[in-house]
């Protein structure tokens, strides 16, 4: 390190200490040329993400802009400045937790609205009116309906779960994006109903992760007012359907049936196009086997153990998994591998 007195680049460290906060290391150095001592500090580099605006422009993430927007929304409201600073800190920490170099401006806007919704309803509507660019009173009323709908979210969640369980579906609900990712990687569901507004992650990022790991999982996204552009983006990333809140369970049930029906047709077609190792059957057990083969084949990194008595078709199942996976010689996506049966 360059000496501040003689500009020599050679020195030695004579003492190192961690700061009280643990955010920096203080080093005492001695110049090897002039013999004078000086202090340097070593800190973790803060990478400032770029914010991608709706029109495609990019600008550095700025907490000052968030604070300014909060102050305008909360003007003349009984809200302490410390609480607004807390919101800024929460959003900054959530963004750092994503570990990304670019973030959509919509992600930041949704995080602000989530925090304001719990802090002050009036401030929430004020911010939403600017964020969603309300054109008339109808737009305002729609947002207010969503606000009151949020108060009943837990009740609606339990109603939705009971509704689909009554139709003989196995249903599980998760309230966060991280929790949802952990769940689907463990359980591998047939279908995911995904809210684009999540408390910890951007719904589009969850969708991209699910489709990246298991393209076969069907996804229906639900959006709020003014999120049609995001819904279209979700469709391009692989979502089958989208619908706007508030939830119409009958309409949602139709989408679920259609999505699962299309999924089953694709599964059967994939196996029937494989005349070398056909699996034929309409029983629930056979259809369940076909379903599992497609799920396993969609993730080439999965390790599979097939057990059963002699002559029950273990090798047939194994050949189908390999043939439908990206590692077969029919797929250009990955380096191909040969199937080798060892008896």
Image (cartoon, rainbow, N blue to C red):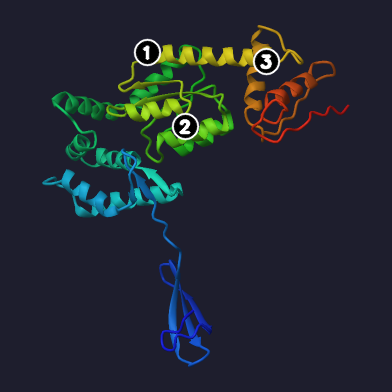
Tell me the CA gap for discs 1 and 3.
Answer: 31 Å
Residue sitting nearer the eye, 300 or 81: 300
Q: Residues within 10 Å of mark 1 (few under 14, many from 20)?
A: few
Q: Which mark is residue 227?
A: none
- Image height of 64 relative to 287, above or below: below
Task: Give the structural element (helix, strand or loop) at label 2.
Answer: helix
Q: Residues within 10 Å of mark 3 (few under 14, many from 20)?
A: many
In the image: residue 173, left or right of residue 155? right
Q: Earlier in the sequence, mark 1 or mark 3?
A: 1
Which residue is labeled 1 in the image?
Answer: 251
Looking at the rendered image, the quarter that the C terminus falls into is top right
Which residue is labeled 2 in the image?
Answer: 207
Q: Which mark is residue 271?
A: 3
Q: Earlier in the sequence, mark 2 or mark 1?
A: 2
| Residue at the spot 41% in from the left edge and 40% down from the top edge | 201
Q: Residue 222: image x %, image y %?
A: 37, 25
Q: Residue 254: image x %, image y %?
A: 42, 11
Residue sitting nearer the eye, 332 or 152: 332
- Image height of 206 relative to 4, above or below: above
Q: Residues within 10 Å of mark 2 (few under 14, many from 20)?
A: many
Q: Earlier in the sequence, mark 3 or mark 2?
A: 2
State which quadrant residue 337 falls in: top right
Q: Are marks 1 and 3 in contact (CB under 8 Å)?
A: no
């Amino acid at each position: 390190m360059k000496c501040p007195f003689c500009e020599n680049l050679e020195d030695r460290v004579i003492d190192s200490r961690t700061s009280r906060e643990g955010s920096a290391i203080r080093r005492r150095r001695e110049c090897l040329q002039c013999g004078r001592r000086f202090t340097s500090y070593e800190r973790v580099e803060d990478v400032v993400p770029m914010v991608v605006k709706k029109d495609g422009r990019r600008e550095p993430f700025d907490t000052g802009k968030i604070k300014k927007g909060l102050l305008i929304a909360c003007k003349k409201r009984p809200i302490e400045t410390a609480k607004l600073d807390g919101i800024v800190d929460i959003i900054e920490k959530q963004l750092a937790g994503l570990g990304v170099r670019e973030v959509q401006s919509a992600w930041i806007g949704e995080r602000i609205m989530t925090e304001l919704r719990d802090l002050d309803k009036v401030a929430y509507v004020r911010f939403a009116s600017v964020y969603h660019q309300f054109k008339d009173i109808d737009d305002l009323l729609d947002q207010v309906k969503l606000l009151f709908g949020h108060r009943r979210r837990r009740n609606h969640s339990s109603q939705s779960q009971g509704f689909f369980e009554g139709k003989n579906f196995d249903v599980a609900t998760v309230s966060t994006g991280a929790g949802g990712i952990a769940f689907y990687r463990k359980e591998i569901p047939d279908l995911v109903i995904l809210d684009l507004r999540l408390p910890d992650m951007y719904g589009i990022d969850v969708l991209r992760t699910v489709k990246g790991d298991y393209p076969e999982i069907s996804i229906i996204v639900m959006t709020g007012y003014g999120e049609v552009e995001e819904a279209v983006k979700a469709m391009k990333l692989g979502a089958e359907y989208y619908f706007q809140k508030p939830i119409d369970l009958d309409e949602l049930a139709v989408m679920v049936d259609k999505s699962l029906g299309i999924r089953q047709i694709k599964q059967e077609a994939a196996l029937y196009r494989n005349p070398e190792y056909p699996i034929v059957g309409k029983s629930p057990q056979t259809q369940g086997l076909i379903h599992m083969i497609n799920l396993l084949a969609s993730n080439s990194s999965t390790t599979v153990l097939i057990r059963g008595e002699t002559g029950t078709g273990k090798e047939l199942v194994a050949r189908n998994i390999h043939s439908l996976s990206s590692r077969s010689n029919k797929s250009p996506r990955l380096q191909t591998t040969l199937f080798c049966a060892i008896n």
